[in-house]
Image (tube, rainbow, N blue to C red):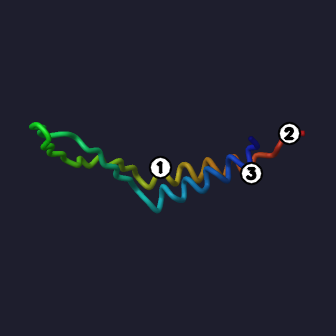
Amino acid sequence: MKLKTIGIVLLIIGALMIIYTGITFFTTEKVVEIGDVEINRSKEHPITWSPYWGVGVVVLGLIMFFIPSKK
């Protein structure tokens, strides 16, 4: 993969990290099971990061984008 392509991908990922500072996903766990009756609970798992990480990824993407290619 070329450095310019990786740089563009990092720019996009960094911009998304600045806009969205976290994601949340849910898992289901079984609480009680009595015969055919089952009680489940949905558990929330947040993952957050600082927007500064996104800025760092954008800067890294810019550096990789502007590195001259060797020929």
- What amino acid is found at the position of numbered circle 3 in the picture? Phe
Q: Amino acid at mark 1?
A: Trp
Q: Looking at the image, which residue sits at the far right?
A: 71
The secondary structure type at the circle numbered 1 is helix
What's the CA distance linking mark 3 and mark 1? 20 Å
Disc 2 marks which residue? 70
Q: Which mark is residue 53?
A: 1
Q: Residues within 10 Å of mark 3 (few under 14, many from 20)?
A: few
CB contact under 8 Å: marks 1 and 2: no
Q: Residue at x 36, y 50 (%)?
A: 48
How many numbered badges does the structure rendering display?
3
User: What mark, if any, has residue 66 been given in the picture?
Assistant: 3
Q: Nearer the viewer, residue 26 or 10?
A: 26
* Left or right: 3, with 24 as reference point: right
Q: Residue at x 34, y 52 (%)?
A: 24
Measuring 40% from the left and 52% from the top, which residue is drawn there? 50
Q: Earlier in the sequence, mark 3 or mark 1?
A: 1
Q: Nearer the viewer, residue 52 or 49?
A: 49
Dot 2 falls on a residue whose secondary structure is: loop
Residue 28: where, in percent of width, then height?
26, 44
Query: Residue at left 50%, top 53%?
Result: 54
Marks 3 and 2, Cα distance to the nearest angstrom?
12 Å
Q: Position of residue 55 (x, y in %)?
A: 52, 54
Give 43 or 12, whichever is nearer the viewer. 43
